[in-house]
Image (spheres, coloured by chain):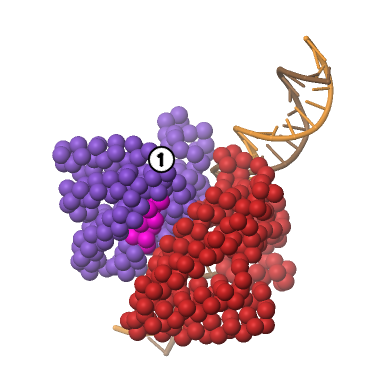
Chain colours: A red, B purple, C orange, D brown
Amino acid sequence: MTAEAPAEEGPATGSRANNVYEWLRERIIDGSLPPGARIREREIAEELQVSRVPVREALPQLESEGYIETLPRRGAVVVPLTVNAAVELFDVRASLEVLAARLAAQACAAGASPAGLEALLERAHEATEAADEDQIADLNSRLHEEILVLSGNRLLQKLMTPVNGHVRRLFHVAKDRDQEELYREHVAIVQAISRGHAELAAALSFAHVEESRNESLPIVERQLEDRPHRT
Amino acid sequence: MTAEAPAEEGPATGSRANNVYEWLRERIIDGSLPPGARIREREIAEELQVSRVPVREALPQLESEGYIETLPRRGAVVVPLTVNAAVELFDVRASLEVLAARLAAQACAAGASPAGLEALLERAHEATEAADEDQIADLNSRLHEEILVLSGNRLLQKLMTPVNGHVRRLFHVAKDRDQEELYREHVAIVQAISRGHAELAAALSFAHVEESRNESLPIVERQLEDRPHRT
DNA sequence: AAGAGCAGTTTGGCATGCCACATTGCCAAA
DNA sequence: TTTGGCAATGTGGCATGCCAAACTGCTCTT
């Protein structure tokens, strides 16, 4: 048996089921597991050197977060990436980002410190000048997460996690727009939040998502025409 | 062995894992499994006459939907019901209901038929006159679901399902407010949706959730002071 | 009486193995 | 050449069993 793993390995995170979950999730988001790909339990289990049980525990979670869907008797498939789904995603994302920004601004008005936000913004500024794409994308993600944390609403954070995952998956096919414009909008949002201007922060956040939608949707549409999802 | 179950039984739904999931979910929502209750795999498995495997598959899903949390090495616990969580819940619910109402109204403006909504409203009217509490609660839930369906946003539906579950759990301790007032608000919302008045529908929906919040939060607070959650 | 071990037991984590459904490929009959 | 059926095999669904960590309650010591 393979238990008592041979010293090396050590994925470091919690349970094996959780490792499988995170591994699959990343694969789906970054596109290594493309839309429509079948997920065969035995295959995953062998690849990750675990039994099928942790895999079977990871799948329901991935399904409930919308990354895969399991057909009645045929197992799991990576959900297709459709234009419709993208539209829905942006609608939901706008609503939730607006709420997050508003709550974060209210928190700041009530005394919370936006220091973390401003630090991230500063680092994003440097990365933008250095044109370090990956770094920028990462910092942008972390900025949005920091706003969520500031909002103080754990449920909102929980709901946004898969939503952001899907956004990342989308952006993998349709790169997010011009970094400098993005940065300017982030500055404005963070300013509004720091100063406790809730409705302004909400409006800016909404516009931010809408800009993102307007920029990426046409690209996504074009991409998805070319490669319709396989069954 | 217990396989080849003795003819009766037949819970009708899909897999056993799914049965376990739904069974646990209902138990948590209706309070049979109170906040803080431990969920012992073997116990559930025996109660439902299945092995531990389907149980272990149901738990991750319940966790990712916020019904339980699993402590590192100690298994699953029903999430406590706190005032804070209730506040967060109402904030998120308001945002999402607003989106649903707006989208549903836009759908109607674009030609979708609100017949289903109006039928439910009619039945709710009858049930209100008959003062059939359970029936009313059920119809109210279905009304909100129908709005979600009309919105056409599947992601939104998916996100709202657990949110509504938590709302139901909350209302189990703090009954929802006066049925007639509720009914009147529903009528107004449905009217706005049917006529395609998106912003009106959104505003009414928001007010609807806020009324619900204002009515139930104080009750919840009182209830939760009495019985702080156990560890 | 209070505290520090120390078995016994509970409980989650996981591997293995069996079964039934389903898909696939092949062959034979028309 | 096409089609109907039948095996071989792939694959998910689940039960069972072992292990190790954690909890329990005891005793034995100070």
Taking the magenta stretch, the answer to whether it contains residue B197 is no
Q: Position of residue B14 (x, y in %)?
A: 49, 39
Quarter of the image holding residue A215?
bottom right
Quarter containing the C terminus of chain A: top right
Q: Position of residue B140 (x, y in %)?
A: 28, 46
Secondary structure state at the residue bearing disc 1: loop
Q: Toward the viewer: A150 or B98?
A: B98
Lateral position of residue B17 relative to residue B189, left or right: right
Q: Amino acid at mark 1?
A: Ala
Residue positioned 20% across, 65% down in the render: B218
Residue positioned 46% across, 86% down in the render: A115
Q: Is residue B131 visible?
A: yes
Classed neighbour count for the residue bearing mark 1: other residues with Cα under 10 Å, few (<14), some (14–19), many (≥20): some
Lateral position of residue C11 relative to residue B105, left or right: right
Residue positioned 39% across, 74% down in the render: A200
Taking the magenta stretch, the answer to whether it contains residue B98 is yes
Q: Toward the viewer: B159 or A213?
A: A213
Quarter containing the N terminus of chain A: bottom right
Residue positioned 18% across, 51% down in the render: B181
Q: Is residue A126 above or below residue A146?
A: below
Q: Position of residue D13 (x, y in %)?
A: 56, 42
Q: Toward the viewer: B86 or A210?
A: A210
What type of secondary structure mainly makes up the magenta span?
Answer: helix
Q: Position of residue D24 (x, y in %)?
A: 39, 67
Label 1 marks a residue whose chain is B
Lateral position of residue B207 relative to residue A59, left or right: left
Q: Is residue D26 above or below residue B105?
A: below
- Span colored in magenta: B92-103
Q: Is residue A118 above or below residue B39?
A: below
For the image shown, how many numbered marks are present on the structure? 1
Which residue position is annotated with label 1?
B112
Q: Is residue B220 visible?
A: no
